[in-house]
Amino acid sequence: MSEEIWTIIKYKPKEGCEDKFVEGLKRLEQIIEKSKAGQEFQNKFIKIDSGEYVQIVGLPNLESLLDGQIEGLDWLDSVDHLLDYYEDDSRTEAFSGFVID
């Protein structure tokens, strides 16, 4: 297996909060850009039919994923009031995995 890792994170904005949440995603993009430190890093946001937003992140290795977790959680705390929680009482649905060679 490769060291490259991808993370998928799904967010569910509350009704009427979508525009503010998108502003929050733009802030997150700025945070990511500042923290890159020259590493190869891919980040995209998509909106799916359910009205949820999905973040797709490609990182060179697990260490780079772990390095960004504190900033990511701080950002998530800043948009918490804009999100509906999932059934498991989580603000997101997420999973990560290593690229298969």
Image (cartoon, rainbow, N blue to C red):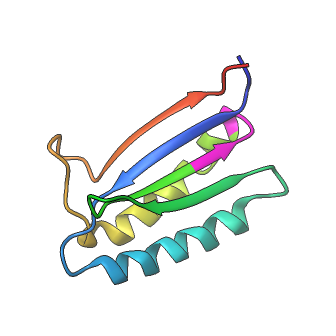
Q: For the view shown, which residue lies furthest in the left direction?
A: 87
Task: Report the residue at 31% width, 77% height from top.
Answer: 18
Residue 37 lies, with reference to residue 99, above or below; the image says below
Q: Quadrant of the C terminus?
A: top right
Task: Report the residue at 48% width, 44% height from top.
Answer: 8
Is residue 5 or residue 65 the one in the foreground? 5
Task: Report the residue at 70% width, 61% height from top.
Answer: 35
Q: Quadrant of the N terminus?
A: top right
Quadrant in the picture for residue 97: top right
Q: Position of residue 53 (x, y in %)?
A: 38, 61
Q: Position of residue 38 (x, y in %)?
A: 85, 56
76 vs 60, left or right, is left
The reply to whether the magenta stretch includes residue 93 is no
Q: Position of residue 88 (x, y in %)?
A: 17, 40
Residue 46 lies, with reference to residue 7, above or below; the image says below
38 vs 2, left or right, is right
Residue 21 lies, with reference to residue 71, above or below; the image says below
